Image (spheres, rainbow, N blue to C red):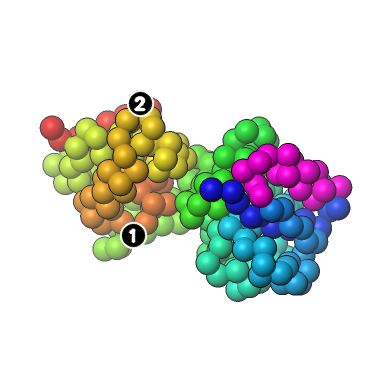
Amino acid sequence: MPHSILVVDREEVSRKGLVALLRSNPEFQTVSEACDAEEAAQVSPACQLTGVLLKTSSLQGQTIETLGKLRERFPSIGIIVLTSSLDGASVIAAVKAGAKGLVTTEMDVGNLLSAIRSVARGEVVFSRQVMLDIVDHLVLPEGKLLQDLKRAPMRDKPKLTAREVQVLSLVSEGASNREIAEALIISEHTVRAHLRNILDKLRLGNRIQAATWATRMGLGRNGAAGVSP
C-alpha cells in the first residue's frame, strides 16, 4: 500500500534531500514537508498521512517538544526520528514523547526507507543500541530489573519454545512482522500469535520491552537461553 509521509526538518537542504529521496520511490505516493511542528499542523487532512519523519541533529529539549506537538497533532500516525546523535536519557525522552522509531544518519538509504515503511505500517523500529538504552530504564511489572532476571537460575526463567525464540531473536534485530514471516516461512497472523504468547510468558507489555529483554538475555543470533521443546 502506498504511503503518505510528512518530512519535518528545520534544515532546508537536508529536508529537500529527504523529500526528493522519498518521492523517487513509488511506495511513497505523497510526500509533504514542514520546517517545524507549527508548519506541520497546517498540512491538509487530504494528504491522509501514514507516517511522519522528523530529522534532527540531536534529541535535545526542542526536539522532544517538537515530538510532543507532532504526536498531539497526529495521534494515530507513526513518527520516526532520524538523528545524528543518540544517548540513553534522550532516547527514553523521545520514546515517551511519542517516537515509534529512532534511527541514525549512519543508516544506509535502503534500511532508512525500510524503517520509514515499517513505522508507516504501525510497527516500531529501533536500532540494537537504542534498545539497549531503553532496557537500562525498564522495570518489569513486579519491580524486577531485567538485569536481575538475567542473573536468575534457569528454572526461574520463562520457558520459550524454539519457534518463539526464533521470533524473539528477529524482533530484537529490528525485523518487522512481515520480515519475520518471510524469514521463518510462516504467516503474519502466526507471527502475531507467537508475539502474544511471548509477551504473556515474559509478562511484558509491548514489542519494545520484548526486544530489549531478548537483547539483554542473549537471545540474539548466538543465544537460546530459556528454550523448551
Q: Is residue 113 above or below residue 207?
A: above
What range of the chain is rendered magenta? 13-29
In the figure, is residue 102 to the left or right of 191?
right
Residue 84 in percent (x, y) is at 71, 44
What amino acid is found at the position of numbered circle 2 in the picture?
Answer: Asn
What amino acid is found at the position of numbered circle 1 in the picture?
Answer: Gly
Give the residue pinned by disc 2: 222
Q: Report the residue at 13% width, 32% height from top.
A: 229
Spatial CA distance of label 1 from label 2 is: 25 Å
Displayed quadrant of residue 151: top left
Give the residue pinned by disc 1: 205
Q: Report the residue at 41% width, 57% height from top.
A: 138
Residue 82 in percent (x, y) is at 67, 48
On the question of residue 115 being in view, the answer is yes
In the figure, is residue 174 to the left or right of 57?
left
Q: Is residue 64 above or below residue 18?
A: below
On the question of residue 195 being in view, the answer is no
